[in-house]
Image (tube, rainbow, N blue to C red):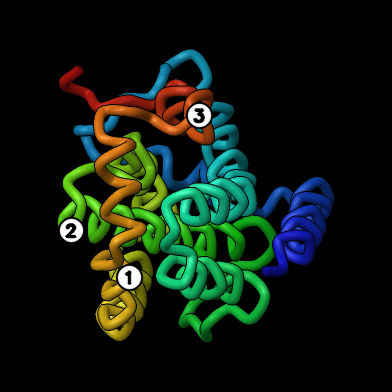
Amino acid sequence: MRVGTLRSIISNAFYHEERTHCLERHLKFHIETLPDRLKIEKDNELESLKHFAMEYIHHVPEFLDALKEASQQAGIEDHVFPFLRIAEEYFISPPRLPNHHIGLMAMMDEAYLAHRLFEELNDRYISRVGMPLIPWDMTLANVVAHQLVGEELANRLDSIVYNTVNEMMDAERHYESDGFKAFVEKEKGNTTSIWQEWPCMGKASGIDWALT
C-alpha cells in the first residue's frame, strides 16, 4: 500500500489551501445549505466546518493503516486489502468527475469516496459477522461530507462506491474460513484497541444531529 504517497498528496493540498483558501470559500457558501437535521455550533460555524473537512481528509491515511492492522488481526486481509488499495487510488488516480474542484476541495471529494467505501465495507462485515470491523458510527461524518461535496456530485460518488463493492462481493468468501470464524468467537463483545481513541469526526468538530 502507498499510504506515504497519500499523505504527501494531502500535504500538498493543504499547502495549496493556505495560498488560495478555495475550500474556505466553498464552505462559506455551503453553510446556508446544510439541512435542518444537522446542528453546528453557532459561535463559529465556518471554523467548525473547516475543522471537520480537514479532519475528514486527514483521517483517510490513518483509517487505511488502522483497517490494515484490524484486517490482519482478523485474518481477512485478502478480502480487505483490495478495498484499501481502491481507497488509495481514489487519491492517487482519482476518477474523472464533472466538477471544477481543486486543492483541498478535490481532496474532500476523494475523501468522501474513501470514507463511503470504508462505511460500505463495514456494513458488509456487520451483515456477515454480526459485529463491526470499525466499531463506531460513520453516518454523521459522511452525511456532513455529502452536503459539503454537493448533492448531485455526492450521489454520483455514492454510485461509484456501490458499483465497486458489488464487483468485489466474491472476496467475501474469506469470511467462511475456519481461522476467521475462530477470530470472531474470540472477539465477540470486545473492541479492538486499534479503534479505542478514535473520536466521531462530526461531534469533535462541533457538528451533531439536531435532534440529539
> Is label 1 in a helix, a strand or a loop?
helix
Do callouts 3 and 2 mark residues in contact (Cβ within 8 Å)? no
Disc 1 target residue: 174
Q: Earlier in the sequence, mark 3 or mark 2?
A: 2
Observer-nearest of 93 and 146: 93
The crowding category of the residue bearing disc 1, from other C-alpha atoms within 10 Å (few below 14, some 14 to 19, many at least 20), is some
Q: Can residue 45 be seen by looking at this rendering?
A: no
Q: Amino acid at mark 1?
A: His
Q: Residue at x 56, y 73 (%)?
A: 85
Task: Quadrant for the N terminus, please.
Answer: bottom right
Observer-nearest of 45 and 171: 171
Distance between mark 3 and mark 1 Cα atoms: 23 Å
Q: Amino acid at mark 3?
A: Ser
Question: In the rendering, at what x and y percent does residue 13 appear?
Answer: 75, 58
Disc 2 target residue: 128
Q: Earlier in the sequence, mark 2 or mark 1?
A: 2
Question: In the rendering, at what x and y percent does residue 67 appear?
Answer: 51, 52
> Is label 3 in a helix, a strand or a loop?
helix
Q: Residue at x 52, y 83 (%)?
A: 95
Task: Give the side of residue 127 with respect to residue 133, left or right.
Answer: left
Please determine whether, in this image, residue 144 is positioned above or below residue 10: above
Q: For residue 207, which quarter of the picture?
A: top left
The crowding category of the residue bearing disc 2, from other C-alpha atoms within 10 Å (few below 14, some 14 to 19, many at least 20), is few
Disc 3 target residue: 193
Q: Earlier in the sequence, mark 3 or mark 1?
A: 1
Tell me the mark number nearer the camera, choosing from 3 and 1.
1
Q: Residue at x 35, y 65 (%)?
A: 154
Q: Amino acid at mark 2?
A: Arg
Do callouts 3 and 1 mark residues in contact (Cβ within 8 Å)? no
Question: In the rendering, at what x and y percent does residue 188 appear?
Answer: 25, 35
Task: Quadrant for the C terminus, please.
Answer: top left
